[in-house]
Image (cartoon, rainbow, N blue to C red):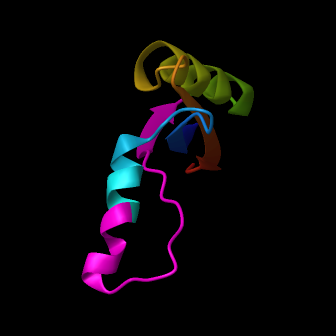
Amino acid sequence: MKYKAHINIMPHKELLDPQGKTVTKNMAGVNVTGVHDVRIGKRIEMTLEADDETNAKSKVDTACKKLLANLIMESYEYELETLS
């Protein structure tokens, strides 16, 4: 079967997010007010083939843990969509 994983990777809440802080600080400069915090992460879409949903989840977890996310600084979550 074919699956699509929608993966969101974000820095741990306990860690400083310098990009987010910079964006937050500059929001007033583009007339966007009332913004108190911005966190910046990554969104990844991955299409894969697997025998079943359990196998697909295993592949996505392995990809996230070994390649896509730095687990020391980031966490990840994903949704799996069946394509066929």
Q: Residue drawn at (64%, 47%), measured in percent from left and top?
A: 79
Q: Residue 42 in the image: state x and y as whole percent.
A: 41, 44
Decide which of 40, 2 is in the foreground and name it. Answer: 40
Q: Residue drawn at (44%, 45%), measured in percent from left and top?
A: 41
Q: Residues in magenta?
A: 25-49
| Outermost top residue | 66
Q: Residue 18 in the image: state x and y as whole percent.
A: 37, 42
Labels in figure, total: 0
Taking 32 as reference, is 9 left or right? right
**For residue 9, above or below residue 65:** below
Q: Residue 13 in the image: state x and y as whole percent.
A: 62, 39
**For residue 26, above or below residue 16:** below
Is residue 40 located in the magenta-colored stretch of the structure? yes
Q: Is residue 39 visible?
A: yes
Is residue 50 located in the magenta-colored stretch of the structure? no
Taking 24 as reference, is 15 left or right? right
Q: Residue 35 in the image: state x and y as whole percent.
A: 50, 73
Taking 66 as reference, is 28 left or right? left
Q: Residue drawn at (70%, 33%), measured in percent from left and top?
A: 53
Which quarter of the rendering shows the N terminus?
Answer: top right
